[in-house]
Amino acid sequence: MYLLESILLGILQGIAEWLPISSTGHLRLAEHFLGLNLPLLFDLSLHIGTLIPVLFFFRRDVKDIISALARLDFKSENGQLIVPLAIGTVATGIIGLVFVDVVESLSHNILSIAIALLIGGTLLYASKAGREKTDRVSIWNALIFGLAQGAAILPGLTRSGTTIAVALLVGTKREKAFKFSFLLSIPTIIAAQGLTLYKQRDTLALTGFGATEVIIGATIAMIIGYLAVRLVRKIIMEKKFHWFALYCWLLGAAVVLLYLRGF
């Protein structure tokens, strides 16, 4: 049973982490309706699994950014992203630290997840109104993107969907919106999972999930996560990103109805 659950959750995490449909929202809904109780270590392994394909997909950009930082080069193409990424990461971190208790209290409330899905879907749909004007991420825009990503700690709001949608709305070109959003997610995920691991280091028991389940779940999440990253880029370039709004609306409405019926 735990092996089947790890496969299911690995697939779910891999699909939902980078497609703009909220992985945390889906995992919490799966826990609620399937009666699951995910141990922290398994949850962490799933997020690490989906972080690896982003690092691989953007490996050249990450390498160039680190190299530019080491040389204090802020003028090259990737060097110009250093300050905006730092500002966006700090903005996300502040939102996360300030509202962490609120988010934890809502993390298993399916009605709040449903409402967040409906809001996220509306934002995704609105992104089609954006007019591409620039491929430069200004300090002000970096702050806005960081705050948008910070808001996505609420289960039901999608990290990639929220930041990309906001980037498109403020006129960022599609390729840069995609690239900056995913690069911004890297330090955020590392910091968030590291903080969670530190704060809950005494509750890392697998409670039924063994090493095999953890490895299988993370591996599946990694493989499907890579495919999801490629799919998101393709959909953004084809100007179909807002299509995901329909899925978010339908799922949000379905969860509201289930909540009203006492599920």
Image (cartoon, grey):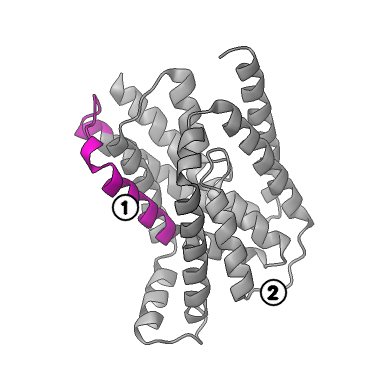
Question: Distance from label 2 to label 1 (Cα)?
Answer: 34 Å
Q: Residues within 10 Å of mark 1 (few under 14, many from 20)?
A: few
Asked whether 257 falls inside the magenta stretch, the response is: no
> In screen coordinates, is 108 left or right of 72?
right
Residue 179: x percent and y percent?
54, 64
Q: Is residue 193 left or right of residue 139?
A: left
Q: With 36 as the anchor, is 256 left or right in this view?
A: right
Residue at the disc numbered 2: 134
Give the extent of the magenta segment.
186-213
* Amino acid at pointer 2: Thr
Query: SS of the residue at dot 2?
Result: loop
- Please state, as top left, top right, bottom left or bottom right, where the C terminus lies in the image: top right
Q: Is residue 63 left or right of residue 135?
A: left
Question: Which residue corresponds to the image point at 70% horizontal and 36% vertical from the top-left?
Answer: 246
Does 199 appear in magenta? yes
> Which image quadrant: the N terminus?
top left
On screen, residue 181 above or below 18: below
Q: Is residue 64 above or below residue 33?
A: below
> Residue at label 1?
194
Q: Residue at x 69, y 34 (%)?
A: 249
Q: Main secondary structure of the magenta part?
A: helix
Q: Earlier in the sequence, mark 2 or mark 1?
A: 2
Residue 55 percent coordinates (x, y): 39, 60
Which secondary structure, mark 1?
helix
Q: Can you give x and y, in whole percent of width and height, for residue 22 in the image?
A: 54, 41
Residue at 39% x, 41% y is 221
Q: Is residue 175 above or below residue 234?
A: below
Type of amino acid under label 1: Gly
